[in-house]
Image: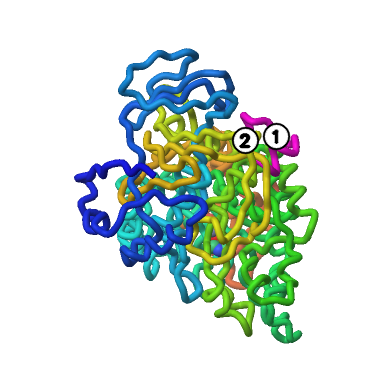
């Protein structure tokens, strides 16, 4: 196999030492070698091989599919950017040509939800920013957005840690940021993340009591802050307190295996938290993104909110779209435990409903929640399901499984496939049309997809570092034959050609399209309040008051006038004063003359604004 010559990227000098070890194109059939090669460069991960980089590239004769349109056209790429999309392009000899006749040329997938190198539940996800991304590229995904987890609540420490983790990236990536505590520093740092770090979304975990979970009070503070910054609020929607209760209930019942995971956090707890987050976002009037929608119950809450006009995005993940919970009951712990994720994979029926919601637009885009642990890590929970690290793989399988499940079954058009796997993510995170499109000026993140071929999925051949695969044994129609990332051919002939450090961080600006109209909605909300009611503080008591007005106050609708120290009048008090009370809200005449006996009254009164005090 021909090896291209390394081009050292001066911007990534850190990777020079890594290059010293080895270089090889790694094929699909020997992906274990790929992982072993990764071990050679210590922490960096799984495999290295330089990309086939040609500054000029022509993809010829394919059907170019965008979310809005498809046509037979050629795509000309130069220096990582799409220059022209037009039929019958003529180019010079210095251009690498890829024949795509009879195939689909589509934007590379964008995975909105991944956890690479995440410290979680006492361990760290097995795929880092190299091995996870290499796997993604082999499956046709060319960008992902990962969740930065703050360090002891600190956003700045969190981003620094993730910037280090991501040094070895071999494809483009962006960051969301989780918010795990609330104080002035966090509020200030959210602004820094948005304005200086290119983060435009913050995630709030309503579950994982004792670690990531936040309170409703924090959620409200966070929603308000997100709104003011133009950042998208995201929620992991499960009621963490109730999950805790459910877990205790299972343990008391002696259910300690992986099935206890599903039983302890039923759909009603997902629906409750989804509904709560939706209502609080409505109260604040800010857009909301619900991650990993796993149940009919949660999906219906989203459908209801969207129908009412609320800006709510629902993200199903591949596991929820294609799996059911039956494997959690498998007598073999190593099989059952690999399906443990949160919210849980649901009973048969939910997946089909989520697919329908996706095809009808109730749900908008598909993620993976790629959060891979190997079987040794999963075994931490052999005696107690609460200790099984939560998460499944999917970053490599998403594009194929969504095609097979949605397009191959006739539930979705090819253009809609592009929308839910790429374009909508780019729009929501405000990087369209740089990403998510095959247009002149877009980044050259492209796949060549053969709808007539097929792929099989197995831990033996996948590129993730994990030794298991929740989609083991599945075979589906359609195959990503070529992946081009940033103009580099990184996957071709079942071979990965990637090098650490070649991926770029993609900054994502705030105020995506979901924010348009928020200010107008705020205005009409304020107008609808019909408040504050203007109540005059001073009364219109006019005329001569024969005495000293000691107090004028507003005491509500019912006016009250009290006269003190008057010996005469219609009624007397024990202290010699007289009390006159006017139970009216219409102009009221209070004939002082009737009370006068030559002594100056001291008048303490609270008047209705329209009351007139006559002398
Ligand atoms: O089980 C899951 N989903 N693990 C990853 C963390 C999260 O909740 O997204
Ligand atoms: Zn989550
Ligand atoms: Zn997640």
Does residue 22 appear in this view? yes
| Left or right of residue 378, residue 129 in this image | left
Q: Which circle marks residue 412 in the picture?
A: 1
Per the rendered image, the range of residues in magenta is 403-417
| Left or right of residue 262, residue 236 in this image | left
- Asked if marks 1 and 2 touch (Cβ < 8 Å), the reply is yes
Residue at 48% x, 56% y: name it: 30
Q: Residues within 10 Å of mark 1 (few under 14, many from 20)?
A: many
Please provide percent x and percent y for residue 427: 50, 35
Q: Is residue 426 above or below residue 557?
A: above
Residue at 64% x, 31% y: name it: 414
- Dividing the image into 4 quarters, which one contains the C terminus? top right
What is the total number of numbered labels drawn onto the structure image? Answer: 2
Q: Nearer the viewer, residue 375 or 512?
A: 375
What element does badge 1 sit on?
loop
What element does badge 2 sit on?
helix
Please provide percent x and percent y for residue 201: 46, 49
Q: Nearer the viewer, residue 203 or 368?
A: 368
Please provide percent x and percent y for residue 553: 52, 53
Q: Is residue 484 magenta?
A: no
Q: Disc 2 marks which residue? A: 417
Task: Measure the C-alpha gap from mark 1 to mark 2.
Answer: 7 Å
């Amino acid at each position: 196999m021909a090896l291209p010559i390394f081009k050292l990227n001066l911007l990534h000098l850190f990777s020079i030492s890594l290059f010293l070890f080895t270089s090889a194109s790694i094929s699909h059939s020997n992906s274990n070698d790929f992982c072993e090669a990764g071990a050679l460069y210590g922490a960096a991960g799984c495999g290295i091989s330089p990309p086939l980089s040609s500054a000029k590239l022509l993809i010829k004769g394919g059907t170019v599919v965008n979310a809005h349109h498809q046509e037979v056209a050629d795509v000309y790429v130069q220096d990582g950017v799409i220059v022209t999309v037009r039929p019958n392009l003529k180019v010079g000899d210095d251009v690498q040509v890829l024949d795509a006749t009879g195939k689909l040329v589509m934007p590379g997938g964008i995975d909105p939800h991944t956890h690479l190198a995440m410290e979680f539940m006492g361990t760290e996800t097995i795929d880092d920013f190299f091995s996870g991304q290499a796997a993604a590229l082999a499956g046709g995904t060319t960008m992902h957005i990962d969740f930065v987890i703050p360090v002891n609540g600190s956003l700045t420490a969190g981003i620094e840690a993730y910037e280090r983790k991501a040094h070895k990236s071999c494809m483009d990536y962006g960051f969301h940021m989780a918010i795990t505590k609330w104080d002035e520093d966090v509020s200030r740092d959210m602004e820094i993340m948005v304005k200086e770090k290119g983060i435009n979304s913050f995630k709030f975990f309503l579950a994982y009591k004792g670690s990531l979970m936040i309170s409703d009070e924090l959620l409200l503070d966070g929603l308000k802050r997100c709104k003011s910054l133009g950042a998208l609020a995201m929620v992991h929607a499960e009621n963490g307190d109730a999950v805790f209760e459910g877990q205790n209930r299972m343990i008391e019942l002696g259910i300690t295996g992986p099935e206890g995971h599903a039983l302890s956090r039923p759909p009603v707890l997902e629906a409750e938290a989804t509904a709560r987050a939706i209502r609080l976002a409505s109260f604040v009037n800010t857009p909301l993104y619900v991650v990993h929608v796993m149940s009919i119950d949660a999906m219906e809450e989203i459908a209801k909110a969207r129908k009412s006009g609320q800006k709510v995005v629902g993200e199903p993940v591949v596991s929820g779209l294609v799996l059911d919970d039956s494997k959690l009951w498998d007598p073999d712990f190593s099989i059952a435990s690999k399906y443990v994720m949160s919210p849980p994979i649901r009973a048969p029926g939910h997946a089909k409903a989520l697919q329908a919601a996706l095809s009808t637009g109730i749900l908008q885009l598909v993620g993976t929640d790629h959060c891979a642990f190997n079987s040794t890590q999963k075994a931490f929970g052999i005696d107690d399901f609460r200790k099984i690290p939560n998460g499944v793989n999917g970053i490599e399988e998403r594009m194929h499984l969504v095609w097979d499940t949605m397009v191959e079954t006739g539930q979705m058009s090819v253009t809609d496939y592009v929308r839910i796997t790429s374009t909508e993510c780019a729009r929501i995170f405000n990087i369209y049309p740089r990403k998510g499109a095959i247009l002149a000026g877009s980044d050259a993140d492209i796949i060549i997809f053969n709808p007539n071929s097929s792929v099989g999925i197995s831990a033996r051949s996948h590129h993730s570092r994990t030794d298991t695969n929740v989609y083991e044994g599945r075979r589906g129609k359609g195959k990503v034959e070529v992946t081009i990332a940033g103009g580099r051919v990184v996957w071709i002939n079942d071979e990965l050609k990637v090098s650490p450090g070649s991926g770029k961080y993609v900054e994502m600006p705030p105020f995506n399209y979901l924010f348009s109209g928020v200010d107008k909605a705020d205005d009409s909300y304020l107008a609808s309040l019909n408040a504050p009611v203007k109540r005059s503080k001073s009364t219109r008591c006019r005329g001569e008051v024969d005495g000293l007005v000691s107090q004028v106050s507003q005491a509500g609708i019912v006016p009250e006038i009290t006269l003190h120290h008057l010996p005469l009048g219609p009624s007397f008090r024990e202290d010699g004063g007289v009390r006159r009370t006017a139970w009216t809200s219409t102009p009221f005449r209070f004939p002082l003359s009737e009370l006068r006996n030559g002594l100056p009254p001291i008048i303490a009164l609270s008047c209705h604004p329209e009351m007139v005090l006559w002398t």
